Amino acid sequence: MGQHTKSASSPASYNNRELSWLSFNKRVLEEAADSGNPLLERLRFLSIFSSNLDEFFMVRVAGLKDQVKAGFNRPDNKSNLTPKQQLSAIASFNHDLVEQQYRLYKQLQNQLEEEQIHFFQMADLATEAIYSLELYFDEQVYPILTPMAIDAYRAFPMLLNKSLNLTVQLEDAYEQEQIHKKTAIVQVPALLDRFIRIDDVHYHYVLLEDVIRYFIHKLFKGYRVISTSIFRITRNADMNIHEDSAHDLLKEIEKELKKRKFGAAVRLEINRIEQDSNITPFLLHELEIHEKDLYIVNGPLDLTCLNDFYNQVKHDHEQLVYETFIPQPAQDIHEDETVFEAVRKRDLFLHHPYESFEPIVDLIREAADDPKVLAIKQTLYRVSGDSPIIASLKRAAENGKQVTVLVELKARFDEANNVEWAKQLEIAGCHVIYGMISLKTHSKITLIVRKQDNRIEGFVHLGTGNYNDQTAKFYTDMSYLTAKRKFGVDATNFFNYLSGYTEKPAFHHFSMAPFDIRNDLLEYIDREIQFHKQFNNGRMIAKMNSLTDKPLIKKLYEASCAGVQIDLIVRGICCLRPGIPDISENIRVISIVGRFLEHSRVYYFHHNGEMNMFLSSADLMTRNMVKRVELMFPIFERRIKERISSILDLMLHDSVKAREQANDGTYSYVISNDNSMLNSQLKLFEQAMDAFVQE
């Protein structure tokens, strides 16, 4: 990746954003290769790898291709790579990763056979099984299929994004001389199970597309099928919303969602074994795809289907999945207390999924039915499909409370869900707002206004993660609940700023993006540098999903050069390179990828023993700093600070799921000096169990 020069501005001091993301997805792939994970979980990591890659192509690769088409050749401001150079590097890196993925798939398939779980080809099945599958095809599949001929009168069809399709090469069964072969396309129905169980006794499966291929001749009476090929296309799915001119943002997004299905093709995948050499150039031409975006794979296309297979078989193979983990009751809430009673007595801290998300759900549920609650205000970015929080908000409005909900319609790939939720909330009587022009509202905050003994009190929940009771079971996030007056005032001013016409508030405790969070963090790093110069004990810890913001990276380099010891726990993209002499030699970067998705954001500054601790909805990415409405907030209680510090310390000593970044941008597993094996996620689970037992 090039030799570094001694400059914090040199491209050699930074990782390219896109290649760093691919490096993260490689770490996901390593979990599929890790024999320490149960077999079906390893299969599921292959699915996660594929799902991640789909989104990467639909958004990041698509964006780079748009830049190339527009003639934009300016290098990025960190790694100094032009869009064309980035696309070339992505293709090289990613083709290797996909090859690894399919080698792993074959290995896991062999191991599944040892567990009596078999994937069969149609040609390997007995006559009785073929007959049974033919009945299934005739009754369940054939009526859904639509053959689409391609000729002078019928153009190449507009195929849906991520759809699985078959090309069929045909010749007339009655013509003596075959002058022209004919081509048709058949889409594999997305609503049918991809893995078809052959009988009820054995765990024997065939793929839906293989069944369709085997009986495809039934769709083309009077023609001979010469060959079939299975292919899949990925399209540009980023939305181009003109917010300034949109009279109704909800309708504008609904319109853009329809376009998303048919954006420009950015990737073509074809099965290597079934590949027809004549059809590949035809597809490349019709879809206008460059050869470097062609992936000829040695196995089934679209391994995201492995997640569905996991859900199909996990209940019958519990020995092949993770041990069931039940989130524990919150340590800060006593058994005989409601959430309201607990928050009134003390500030609460919850660490999900080790501690249950239910207290947050209960808080909204209690508020909806509590006659003393006057108003509920909440931001929603991503919520679950059958959200109990949405149900409580609707009920609260129906009970006459003033309910204000900011629904972020622009939450990528959740736009359709959020449009529907916004409509339902409005029908129920909630006041629904959509945020600010050109900014996504990514903050996670709830304010409940309650009247008690003729006194108005505010209860505030702030979090690092979404109000999603489902993802809270496998995303690690932190929740903070308080009844402190100044937090309530800050929350009130925040919501008024989002919903009305008012200048940006001067908060007591909140720091808000755009801009303020970055400026405040830069100031805190400067202060840490000054403390270090005075006391020689400079120390910072930051945990986040991604780190891309150049001003903050340069300031971290400055702190490193001053001697401040910096530990960064960055799960995904990290454009900062640690360990470069005279630039970042005092910075350590680790990434933890394991059973749970590390999602919490924590920023800690030693400040000569002051222990300034902040939680936030924001990663240290440029988009979070300047294009999103984010919140960062302090933790004042020493017991909570110490608890968060112990969590960070555990993660920094992880020697099972942690990978450390070298100064060339590559990652390798952390090896402990004493050969101890510490899995921080497992240890935090054990600690949550112990805390519940002791209570």
Image (cartoon, grey):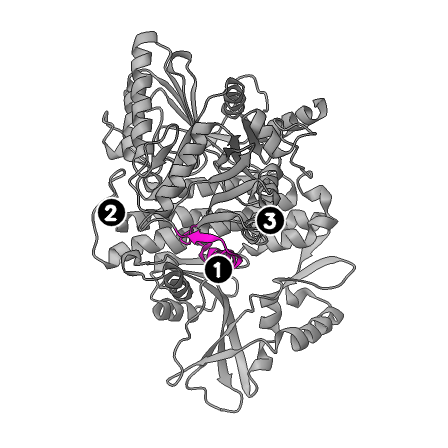
Q: Which residue is mark 1?
A: 423
Q: Nearer the viewer, residue 101 or 448?
A: 448
Question: First in sequence: mark 1 or mark 2?
Answer: 2
The x and y percentages for residue 420 are 49, 59
Residue drawn at (35%, 40%), measured in percent from left and top?
624
Residue drawn at (36%, 62%), measured in percent from left and top?
252
- Image quadrant for the C terminus? top right
Q: Which residue is mark 3?
A: 388
**Tag 2: Cα neighbours inside 10 Å, few (<14), some, or many (≥20)?**
some
Q: Is residue 261 left or right of residue 368?
A: left
Q: Amino acid at mark 2?
A: Thr
Q: Residue 105 magenta-drawn?
A: no
Q: Nearer the viewer, residue 4 or 79?
A: 79
Q: Where 360 sits versus 151, above or below?
A: above
Question: First in sequence: mark 3 or mark 1?
Answer: 3
Gap in angstroms between the C-alphas marked 3 and 1: 16 Å
Where residue 494 sits, quadrant-wise, is top left
Q: Where 534 sits versus 336, above or below?
A: above
Q: Where 47 sits versus 490, above or below?
A: below
Q: Amino acid at mark 3?
A: Pro
The x and y percentages for residue 469 are 58, 44
Helix, strand or loop at disc 3?
helix
Residue drawn at (53%, 48%), measured in percent from left and top?
401
Labelled disc at residue 82: 2
